[in-house]
Image: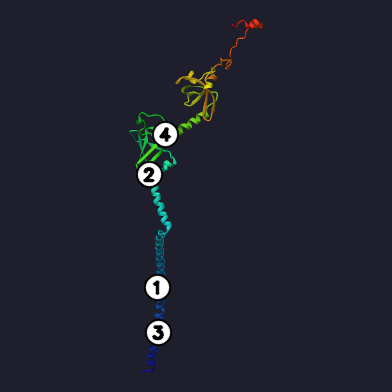
Amino acid sequence: MSEELKTEVTAEAVETPEEVVAASTASETTDKPTVAEEPTVTVEEPVVAVEEPAIAVEEPAIAVEEPAAVKESNTPESTETMADLENHFDDASPWNIVKRYMQDKTKLTVTIEGVVNGGAVTTIEGLRAFIPASHLSLSYVEDLTVFLTKEIEVRVIEADQSNNRLVISAKSILRETEKAEKEKQIRNIQVGTVTTGTIETLQNYGAFVKLENGLSGLIHVSQISHKRIKAPGDVLKLGDEVKVKIIGVKDGKISLSIKALEENTEPNNEYTEKVDIPKSENIGTSLGDLFKNIKL
């Protein structure tokens, strides 16, 4: 083999390993970034996994509150609350409600639903309530059917659960209303007013008169006439229509007078005894005059 040929073979043999090494090095260099990126993806996955336990931790927190609520239910305070609730439900029963109405004298508006023997019926808090005929009005009512479907104000006057008896009345409210109206009318009365009325009651001390406005006033016996009378019945009778003058209002009472409207024809009401005095010329002083009418 010639020297030139050896030299070429040797050169080829040397270059081949370098290329292999270079290729290998280049391959390793190229592959290394690929291996480095894979852990980066792997690191991100645990981050997501960490968030999931954080959500799972909140659930036990809710579960912990439930035993606390159960524990509180066994405390004395909770027991008292349950008792209060029971009392509340008991107080809300219809009979307890109507009993409170009676104690508080509560005004109730009801509708008359029916008429029965001796009165009328309605419903209060789902309970049947009875209104005696004498408690429907201040005056006697002959036909109770006039109250059917009529709304009236009432109060509970009896609530007996054991006997299933609930009684209501309109009378007390009607009396209060009448009294308030009367007081208002009296406040508006002017002393000196002349009006007419009817004799409704006679007493030894005077006569009561029902006036045109529905009020009553008293004519004292001394205000009936200028003449002297022993009793009002001497000159007045029940049902007589009289003309009177209002002479006073005090403590809700009205004082009337007939005498104030009459002309005084009596100059003096005092009783004077008539005495005849003999004339002076008829008076004698002699002993004969003194003894002339004496018989022995």
Give amino acid for label 4. Answer: Lys
Position of 265 with respect to 285 (left or right) is left
**Which comes sooner in the sequence, label 4 or label 2?**
2
Q: Which residue is denoted by mark 3 in the rendering?
A: 21
Name the spot of residue 133 as percent of width and height, x first.
37, 32
Give amino acid for label 2. Answer: Trp
Report how far apart the C-alphas of labels 3 and 1 lie in the structure.
32 Å
**Which comes sooner in the sequence, label 4 or label 1?**
1
Give amino acid for label 1. Answer: Thr
For residue 95, the mark is 2
**Helix, strand, or loop for circle 4?**
helix
**Which comes sooner in the sequence, label 1 or label 2?**
1
For the rendered model, the colour scheme is rainbow
Pick the front one: 50 or 111? 111
Residue 61 is drawn in which quadrant? bottom left
**Which comes sooner in the sequence, label 3 or label 2?**
3
Report how far apart the C-alphas of labels 4 and 1 lie in the structure.
94 Å
